[in-house]
Each structure stands twice: as C-alpha cells, then as structure tokens.
Image (cartoon, coloured by chain):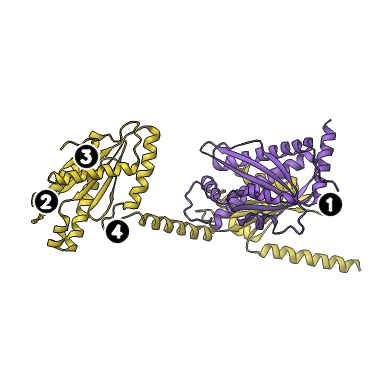
Chain colours: A yellow, B purple
Amino acid sequence: METTDTTALAEKFYICTAAAHKINIGAVVLNNAGEIWFWNRWLEEKSGLPAGTAVGKMFLELFPELNNSRLASAINAALKYGLTSLLSQSLNKAPLPLFENPSNRKERLQQAIHVTSIESQNGEHFCLIQVNDISLAVKKERLLREQAEKLRGLAYIDGLTGIPNRRRMDEYLADEFRRAARSNEPISVIMADIDHFKQYNDGYGHQAGDFCLQRIANAIKAALRRPADLVARYGGEEFAIVLPDTPMDGAAALADDIRKHVENLSITHETSEVTGCVTLSLGVSSTLPNSRLSEGALLSQADSALYLAKLKGRNRVVIYREHPQV
Amino acid sequence: MTLHISDIQKNALIEIFNIGVGQAANSLSQIVGEVITPSVPTIAILHSDDQADAISTITRKPRICAVSQDFTGGFDARAFLIFPEGKTREIVRRMLGESVSADELSKMEQEALCEIGNIILNSCSSALSDILHISFHSSIPAYHLGFADEILFAHSANNDDLLILCHIDFSIPSARSDGYLVFLLSPPSFNMLTRQVEQFLLGID
C-alpha cells in the first residue's frame, strides 16, 4: 500500500515538474532563504543558464545587479510577508537578462513579472517568480503611440503650406502668453496678408495661387530667427507669426525683413497695383510690461495694424499704437 | 457586536498607514527619480449607512480609476487605491515620463498603474504585519475604471461592510497629487483589526 502511494506521489511530482518546465512563461521558485529551488526550461532557453547552474544558487548572487532593485523588494515582500507583487514593463525596464537568443545578447526581452508567495506545508514562505515575454505587445503599443503622435501632428499642420495651422497657433499663443506673463517677458505677434491675392488667383489660376502661398510660407519661415518663433497659416492668404520674448522694435524689424524677403521673391503679379510683384502687408502688435492685454486683444491689435497697412498703400509694416498716427 | 474604534486606536492605525505610505513613497521615488513626500494620511471609518457619503467624497468626479487587491490572513480585506479619473493620466504620465495621448490608459499604462497601487497597498500591508504581528497573503492587483459605487461594492456580499477611508497627498517637486486608500472589511474582520490594534497598544504601555 505504501509503495503504491509513494509511486503515485512520485508520478504526480514528475508530471507537475514536467508541466512547470513546459509552460510558455519563465518560472522560478525560491526557498525561504532566497535560494533558487526551481528554474524552468523557458528560463534556461531565454537566459542561457541551465537549471544545473541556477538551482542551489542565491537568486541575488546569480543576478547581483538586482540588489536593492524593485524585484529584490518584491521577492522580500513574498518571502517575508507572503505578499504578491506585479512588476510592469513600463516602470521596470527588463530587469532580468533574458534574450530571444541568449548567444546573441542584443536586446533584452521586455518583461512583465509577477512575484507571489507559496506557503509550504510547514508554513514557510516560498516565492514564485513568473516572467512573461511581452516584447511583441510593447512593440505594438509603441507603434500605436507613434502613429497617434503623427496624427496629432498632422492635425496641427496646414495641408497646403506644411506650416502650422491656426489651431496650432491659437494653442501656441495661449501657452506662450501665459509663459510671458509669468516671466514678465514681452511677446509680439505679426499678422501678414498677401496683397491683392484674389486678383492673383483670378489671373493665374488656383494652382499658381497655391504655389504662391507655399513660396510665401517658406519665405516667412526662412526669415524667422529663433526656434521659438512660429509662423502659421491663419486663413486664406493670411499668416500669423508669434514671437515670444520679443519687444516691439525687434518684431517691427523682423516684419520688415519678412516684407523684403517676399518682395525679393519677385513673383510676377501684373494686376497688382503695388509693384507688379506679389507683396505682403504686415501689422505688428506687442505686449508692454505689466499690460493686462489678452492674447485675443493682441491678435486683433495686430489685425487692425494690418488693416492700416492696407489702407496706407500695402507692401508695408504698420505697428499698432494706442493712438495710431497715419 | 460593537463596531467602535477609539481615538487612540484610530491614531495607531494612522501611524501604521503613515509608515506604510512612507515606505511606498521611497519605492515610488526610486521609480520616478524624484523625491516623493507623502502627507500624514487622514483616516475615516465609515459604516454602511455613510458609504454613500464616502463615495461622494471620493468622487468629486463621478468616475474613478482604481487598483484593487485582496488581502487574506490576520483579517480579510479588499483594498483599493483610488484616483479621480482625470488625474490618473497625469500621474501615469509623470511616472512613465512620456506622453499619454489617448483618453483611456493603454494596457501597458494600466499595468503601470497596477504596480503603483501594488507598491502602496503592499507597503501598508507589510507595515500592518510588522507592527501588529499578523500576516497576510495578497492577490494580484487588478485595474478598474468606472463609477465608484460599482467598483467598490461590486463584490461585497452584504452591505454591512465597514470602510476605512484613508486620504493621502503625494507631493512631487514638479506636482501634487492625492489619492485615497479604501479598505473594505466585514464586521468580523474589522473586530479582528481593532482587537489587534488594542493588543499592540497594550503591549507598548
């Protein structure tokens, strides 16, 4: 009777061990002292360490880099307190040296690790560490994130000219406005509008009109000097330029540079009454120190300066002043 | 069965949670690479009648994000770490140091949040073990998103469970966040807890 029991028990032990070896995740069992008790086949394959080498070693001696790590404290929580821990891939970058092909230790497998305790029959805590290879899921998620970011980027770009669109400008201006208020720095905006663009479109066709818009967008972009300066297509043939930490005179000088840049493109515009070329009118507005201006007011000031530039004969820069002098 | 807790017992519990949360903050600081300083928690014990109030305290926003873990041993409890839904993204973003653009957390981000909950809940539980000399086993943490009452009371068989509501503020140099720990205990478990706290208090006299 006893022999059958022993045989049955041995058979059960054999099958359970074989099963633990065959499961498609990494499984380590540590005894109460933290010594490796079981090391399954999956781990042999991914670590290159045969069970014969691993079993009997202290886990933290086998992986000294894990001393004082989150995994070490999770093991301690299981052995000392009987607690379960989860180590997410995002917060723990590949704690164990596991590889798709351990002879070519290029890139560690991305791991999600569960640490649980197993209570032995005499009440001692053992520890089971389960390791899941989630490299594929991580890759997939990274791809999705990149795509989402790209889409988000596209939502902020003007399709025709490739420069930021009005939505992006509105958000950027709001952000920079707050920053300028905090650090008490001036901020300027320029509104620019192509002179007699409707006639250009009518005379040369929409395709030529589109090309003209693209060239002007590029010319404005090229004239900007600092990475924080931003030009956006604000409407049909209207552009807005945000200039953080720029006082009035700097903005006015830049506006005139832009005007010259566009004039120098010498895009023929025979029906324009200005010069026979495509030209730009620009309005400039700046905040003064301690002014309580809103960003909307700043924009509309630049807009009314632009309107004045049109009135005064186009191809020029007008600076907004409280009492504009003609 | 009296379900009363004295002020002294309550203070002892606050001290235990304080130690647990402090340990959790150490572990979290290592992960974030910034020093996280938790406030001393405040604790409220609520009976089933007050649970509606508790929920409205937690849910200044109607929906919450929670990580739950079951503890069995010295006494049985279901424990939650709860954040208002909108704040969770902020917290995860800070922990992961990358932008989370989607409205809902991805699977990976949910796991990261589970780990944060796991660290805090396990630390509180090991503080209880160390001080009260009782032991617990804990389950794998689970992520929940939804309405507070559905998440908190989905598994309580009867409504006379007691609820220990523990509020903690975590301040990180770059920001402040707060969250709630909620422990649901059946009346017998609650009695076991108070008895163990009482024994501990007698021991230090």
Residue at 70 percent of width and 65 percent of height: A19
- Secondary structure of residue under mark 1: loop
Q: Position of residue A52 (x, y in %)?
A: 68, 55
Q: Which mark is residue A122?
A: 1
- CB-based contact (under 8 Å), mark 4 and mark 2: no
- The answer to which image quadrant residue B36 occupies is top right
Measuring from the top left, give residue A35's x and y in whole percent: 72, 48
Query: Which mark sits nearer the N-terminus, 2 or 1?
Result: 1
Mark 4: amino acid: Gly
> On the rendered structure, is A204 left or right of B136?
left
Q: Which residue matches tag 2?
A: A266
Q: Measuring from the top left, give residue A134's x and y in whole percent.
A: 56, 58
Could you classify mark 2 by the number of other residues whose Cα lies within 10 Å: few (under 14), some (14-19), or many (20 or more)?
Answer: few
Residue bearing the label numbered 4: A159
Above or below residue B126? Residue A250 is above
**First-in-chain label (2 vs 3):** 3
Q: Amino acid at mark 1?
A: Asn
Mark yes or no: residue A150 visible: yes
Camera-near label (3 vs 1) is: 3
Q: Secondary structure at mark 2?
A: loop
The total of numbered circles placed on residues is: 4
Amino acid carrying label 2: it is Ser
Tag 3: Cα neighbours inside 10 Å, few (<14), some, or many (≥20)? many
Q: Nearer the viewer, mark 1 or mark 4?
A: 4
Residues under numbered marks 2 and 1 in contact, where contact means CB atoms less than 8 Å apart:
no
- The answer to which of marks 3 and 1 sits earlier in the sequence is 1
Marks 2 and 3: CB-CB under 8 Å? no
Q: Quadrant of the N terminus of chain A?
A: bottom right
Which residue position is annotated with label 3? A254
Q: CA distance from mark 4 to mark 2?
A: 25 Å
In percent of the image, x 57 and y 54: which residue is there?
B110
